[in-house]
Structures are given as structure tokens and as C-alpha cells.
Image (tube, helix red, strand yellow):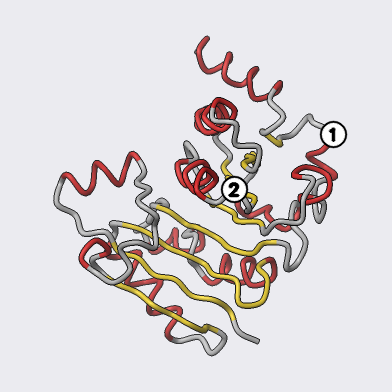
Amino acid sequence: MRKKQQRFEDNRKSRNVIEHGKEIFEAIKGQWKSAYFCNDHDIVVELACGRGEYSTGLGAIFRSKNFIGVDIKGNRIWVGSKKARLEGLDNVAFLRTQIDHLEKYFDPGEIKEIWIVFPDPRPKSSDEHRRLTSPKYLEIYKRLISQEGLIHLKTDNTGLFDYTLELLENRDDIGHLEYTWDLYNSNYATDHHGIRTKYEHQFSTQGHEIKYLKFCFRE
């Protein structure tokens, strides 16, 4: 408990953690480029980022883009926040909030790209509305992402992947849909830039194939 409390205190002091209690938390919507990053670079968001492996990993590779990891778990965000600070990744920030509240912190079209990496699959039918690829969330992403902006899903869970793919294939506003049930033995193996999360290492070691898809919304 003491360790967790210290991490929460570090988050309160860290500029790269945007959370309740900080003045910028209520004023950041539509102002990420001007008020936080102080540049005009594209914004890439990692949803349910956990330790922020993709935010920090991509941030180190693409210094001319801005990356924001979003998660409600402050204990996990602390890990990514610390890594970003230690590596001098001033193009990486973390927003502590529920994914449901994204529209409180981003303007329509403000996001250029979204990564959803190993989200909770929520296998129960009663939990469908909580899946990060459910119609409810797809509509949120559609309002926030820029025209032709890419959305990526990476998961080991076949049920979630098939569910998402069926949803996308039955919508008339989806463009450039590409997918594979075995990422590392496909033409998309380089799309993830060699970045693997803690869970991905675990699942791959157990022999699970990693599924991947990407798409955009069209007018």
C-alpha cells in the first residue's frame, strides 16, 4: 500500500501525468498540441495503456509524433510515466481517466491514430458494452479521430477478435480494413514496430497466436 501511495504522489508531481486535481486536466480538451506538447505534431492515443509500453515504445521511435496513454489505473500509469521521463520522451504523456470519458478531453478530429493493445476481452455477453471495440466505443472513436486516421487492435483473444471483425465487416463506414489471425507470420509483422507488452510476451510464450487488425472510418 505504501508503494502504491508513493506512486500516486509521484503522479501528482509529474508533468506528464494529466489527472484529476491538476488545472490542465479540466482545460486540455482541444489544447494538447498548444498547451501540453507545444508543437503541431500528430496525436496518437493508446487506450487502456496499462504500463504504457506502446506509448513509450512508439514515442521513442517516432519523435515527430505526440503519444498519449489513457488508463484509469494510476499505479500502472506511473510505470510508463517514469520510463518516459528517464528516456527524455517529452512527446509522451498519460491521461488518467475512464475510456468512456474520452470526449471530455479530446476535440473531434484531434486524434490522428488509436492503438488498442490487449484490452480486457470481456467475454460475457452482458459485458459486450464494455468491450473497447463495441459499437458504443466505435462511435466515440469515429467522432474523435481525424479523417482516414488509423485504429489498430492487437489481441490474443480469438473471441474478441472475431467479434470485432464481424462488427467492422457489417458497417458501411469502415475503410481500409486489413487483418490477420497470426501477426508474426503475416505481412503485417512490422506494423507493431517490434513492441511487445508484458502480456504479449506471456501469451506468445504459451503458444497463443497474436491477432491484429487495422481500419479507418470513411465519410
Callout 2 secondary element:
loop
Q: Quadrant of residue 145?
A: bottom right
Task: Return the x and y of residue 133 as percentages of the image width and height.
Answer: 48, 65
Q: What residue do we see at 38% from left, 48% from top?
A: 195
* Camera-side mark, 2 or 1: 2
The residue lying furthest to the left in this view is: 207
Q: Which residue is mark 1?
A: 23
Task: Return the x and y of residue 78 as percentages of the image width and height.
Answer: 55, 28
In depth, the one of 62 and 75 nearer the eye is 62
- Amino acid type of disc 1? Glu
Callout 1 secondary element:
helix
Mark 2–mark 1 Cα distance, whole angstroms, equals 26 Å
The residue lying furthest to the top in this view is: 2
Marking on residue 63: 2
Q: What residue do we see at 85% from left, 45% from top?
A: 27
In depth, the one of 213 and 193 nearer the eye is 193
